[in-house]
Amino acid sequence: MNIWIAIGVTALGCYAVKLAGLLVPAGALERPLVRRLAALLPVALLAALTAQQTFADGRTLVLDARAVGLAAAAVALVLRAPFLVVVGVAVVVTAGVRALGG
Amino acid sequence: MTSAGSGLTLLQTCALSLLVFTGASQFALVGALAAGGSPFTAAAGAFFLGVRNAFYGLRLSQLLALPRAVRPFAAQWVIDETAAVSLAQPTRRGARIGFLVTGLSLYVLWNLTTLLGALGAEAIGDTDAWGLDAAGPAVFLALLAPMLRTGTERLVAGLAVLLGLGLLPVLPAGVPVLVAALAAPAVLWARGRRGGAGRDDAGERGDAPERDGTPEEDR
């Protein structure tokens, strides 16, 4: 029963914040400063998420095969490789490093 | 999936994916419950992880310009991936298609894999060995890269990385990413001050919300 409570509360809360973002009146977004902020927030969030998913293991920071894979993906991006190639390079290189490193 | 291994039933696991549909929040909830946390503290942690979706919603609502009646339905799909794909599109039409396709395919796939994962929890084996855990950050990186057009965006991204990683060991899960989001207002504020208060809104015109990059260069 406790688990159902937790699921219910989480579902409602997470849906509410998603909806809240969409429902902010368009008028408030017309202001240039707000608009620039709304454009920059995803940049900050994506950058932080990318870094965390690359270097985090739970709540500790680690340097492992994922970092090599992401570095390879970055090189692919600089070389203007297509999206799927970039992701594929990251996966293959990460698996390769793991296979070599045991 | 992990939740099947931490005492949730098949039904509970699937309900979680169908109703919450924000991967990080789901993992946090399951992890906190498995560690013996109360349902409310577990839900609070998951909620913090979900707050960032509100920021995506801010940007998406002006980009997609959805009719009011559609918004409650679209809201469930406002997540990292749909936001990233939509924001990467040059036109509103492209952004809408991107949002719809990404939202639908992720929703179906996510819930299918949840079901399969819960049914055969141990059968899949170690997905890490295949390097699949690098796919997530690589997707984010590929979507982030085209956004880093000017110094302002690069500065925000760099600061966010530092904050996100630096605070990870000291703050509860989900909070470091929210703090990292503060990089955006911080950089805007610093740039605004340097350029002088009177110029704050100068380079900004009232037309398309798409970023064209040029007005930022000189601030």
Image (cartoon, coloured by chain):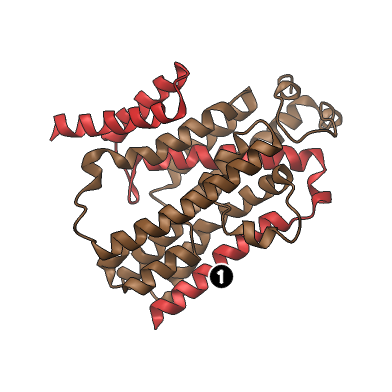
Chain colours: A red, B brown
At horizontal 85% and vertical 34% (from top left) the residue drawn is B206
Few, some or many residues within 10 Å of mark 1 (<14, 14–19, 20+): some
Res. B197 image quadrant: top right
Q: Is residue A90 visible?
A: yes
Q: In the rendered view, would you say B108 is above or below A57?
A: below
Q: In the rendered view, would you say A81 is above or below B113?
A: above
Horizontal arrangement in the rendering, residue B99 relative to residue B46 (left or right): right
Q: What x and y, as percent, mark residue B98?
A: 58, 41
Res. A61 image quadrant: top left
In the current view of this chain or complex, which residue is farthest to the left?
A102
Q: What x and y, as percent, mark residue B63?
A: 71, 42
Q: What x and y, as percent, mark residue B97?
A: 62, 42
Q: What x and y, as percent, mark residue B172?
A: 43, 57
Query: Which quarter of the rendering shows the N terminus of chain A?
Result: bottom left
Q: Which residue is mark 1?
A: A12
In the current view of this chain or complex, which residue is farthest to the bottom?
A1
At horizontal 53% and vertical 58% (from top left) the residue drawn is B50
At horizontal 42% and vertical 55% (from top left) the residue drawn is B110
At horizontal 20% and vertical 48% (from top left) the residue drawn is B126
Res. B5 image quadrant: bottom left
